[in-house]
Image (cartoon, rainbow, N blue to C red):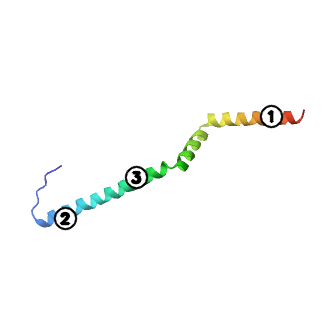
Amino acid sequence: MNNKTFSSFEEIDNEIRLLRLEKEIDRLSLTQQVSASAESLSPKNLLANTLGSLFNNKRWLNIALGYGMQLLAKRYLNKNK
């Protein structure tokens, strides 16, 4: 913390106002970050993010498509017997 030298009470009052505003801004920012964190940890968002990350990876998508194609092929072949 820097030691400031003030030459008048007006400068002290201005500094106090500035510090109060900074404190309020920091409090609002923290409140917003907590809200955003709580929202991102909701069950709905957790599931959406998990599924989204699984299917954004092409490897998992290829595995799922391959498995789906196998199931469709088995059903089609069993139907035609």
Q: Residues within 10 Å of mark 2 (few under 14, many from 20)?
A: few
Where does residue 75 sit, x and y in percent of width and height?
Answer: 82, 36
- Quick one: 19 or 37, which is closer to the camera? 37
Where does residue 54 sit, x and y in percent of width and height?
Answer: 59, 39
**Could you tell whether 65 is left or right of 19 in the image?**
right
Residue beneath disc 3: 34
Q: Residues within 10 Å of mark 3 (few under 14, many from 20)?
A: few
| Residue at horizontal 32 percent and vertical 57 percent from the top | 27
Q: Amino acid at mark 1?
A: Ala
Q: Amino acid at mark 2?
A: Asn
**Could you tell whether 13 is left or right of 21 in the image?**
left
Q: Among all residues in the image, which is located at the extreme bottom?
A: 10
**Could you tell whether 6 is left or right of 60 in the image?**
left
Q: Amino acid at mark 3?
A: Val
The reply to whether dot 1 and dot 3 touch (C-beta < 8 Å) is no
SS at circle 2:
helix
Residue beneath disc 2: 14
| Residue at horizontal 53 percent and vertical 46 percent from the top | 46
